[in-house]
Amino acid sequence: MEDKELLKTLCMSHGPSGREHWLGDYVTEVFSEFGQVTRDNLNNIIIHKKGKGKGKIMLMAHLDEVFMIITEVKENGFLAFKGNGIDPKTLVSKEVIIHGKEAIHGIIGIKPPHLMKDEDRKKAVTIDSLLIDTGYSKESLENIVKPGDYVTVKGNYKELLNNNVSVKTVDDRGGVVALYRCAKELKNIKHDMDVYFVCSAQEEVGHRGAKTATNRINPDIGIAVDVTFDCGMYGLEHGDTELGKGGVICIGPNIHPKVRKHLMKVCKEYNIPFQLEVEAGNTGTDAWDIQVAGEGVATLLISIPIKYMHTSVETVNMDDIKNTGYMMAKLIESIKGEELEELVCF
């Protein structure tokens, strides 16, 4: 399967935190050619590709997406909701999917400016000021939707210039595609370490899948693959991460220094483009929980730069996804069992 095809299918699907199993069968089918696929009690999907049994390395990308949840069914087919990880400004005029007894479509509208009072025009958009309009009567809607039902944004897949793609939930299904690319690169390679690819659950609500999966696998090395901000227009004001210049290797206390330096050495040896990013504290990713699982895990964070994070138009460069997968594959090839203990020591 081509990377773009997989990214499109994953991103156009729906799987909010706690409902990753909606994508479970598809992900299992896609990854089953590379190893044994299992799921744990928290909906983590774990693919075990056997090596020579000389150590274990875990690669993790989260499968869940940001979401909304219904709090009240109102008159005239309107629904009140709360959000998780979504700026309410980005929800105005969006089409959404309400996952009730059946999936139904809704729209999030706003009062036209012609009808607003002056003070209303100056107010910030808040979740509490927004409603989902379904067009149903309240009586009909109550038979389909109830408080606690999930809502996700409906996205559109667009291919842009320079091998860029715009679609929802690149965070972090772009990372899942990077795992797939790595698995393809390793398919016929006899590597020393056993490899565990993990599509983790509930990252967006506290990295919960990372905790349980890492404790179960107990890897010698753990790599979180997530997304980071680009530094272009509407991106970070300070920094130099850009789309199309490779995966971003993190430096900081969450990251094992020797393993990180080894990865950079491998990238230089194989001319794999990469960028650097410094995080002085919490990286806000699964890496934060991987590192302190069990007795501690030598941890890396590799991020794929994107634009417009947590919106319906997240934009990514496909070469960055490919090269992120490629650098992980070459890292795994390079690690010899007899050198592992020294590598993971400080």
Image: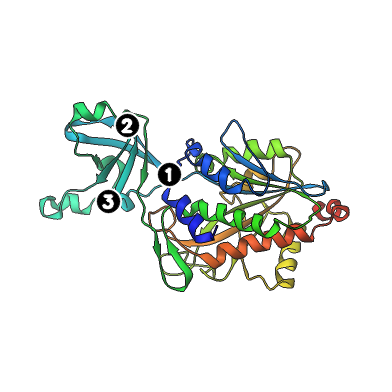
Q: Amino acid at mark 3?
A: Val
Q: Would you say 346 lies left or right of 315 here?
A: right
Residue 38 in which image quadrant: top right
Q: Secondary structure at mark 1?
A: loop
Q: Would you say 49 lies left or right of 90 here?
A: right
Label whose residue precedes the other's in the sequence (2 or 3): 2
Viewer-side residue, 233 vs 246: 246
Q: Residue at x 27, y 51 (%)?
A: 92
Q: Is the residue under label 1 in contact with that under label 3 (CB below 8 Å)?
A: no
The colour scheme applied to this rendered structure is rainbow
- Reading the image, the residue beneath label 1 is 14
Residue 87, percent across and down?
37, 50
Residue 52, percent across and down?
82, 49
- Direction left: furthest residue: 114
Q: Residue at x 59, y 52 (%)?
A: 283
**Vertical placement of residue 97 versus 279, above or below:** above
- Reading the image, the residue beneath label 3 is 92
Q: Is residue 143 visible?
A: yes
Closer to the eye: label 2 or 1: 1
Q: Amino acid at mark 2?
A: Thr
Viewer-side residue, 335 vs 3: 3
Viewer-side residue, 129 vs 162: 162
What is the distance, in whole Å, between disc 3 and disc 1 at their CAs? 20 Å
Disc 3 crowd, CA 10 A, few/some/many (<14, 14-19, 20+): some
Q: Would you say 5 lies left or right of 186 here?
A: left
How many numbered markers are drawn?
Answer: 3
Residue 122 in which image quadrant: bottom left
Residue 242, percent across and down?
52, 69
Q: Quarter holding the C terminus? A: bottom right
- Reading the image, the residue beneath label 2 is 71
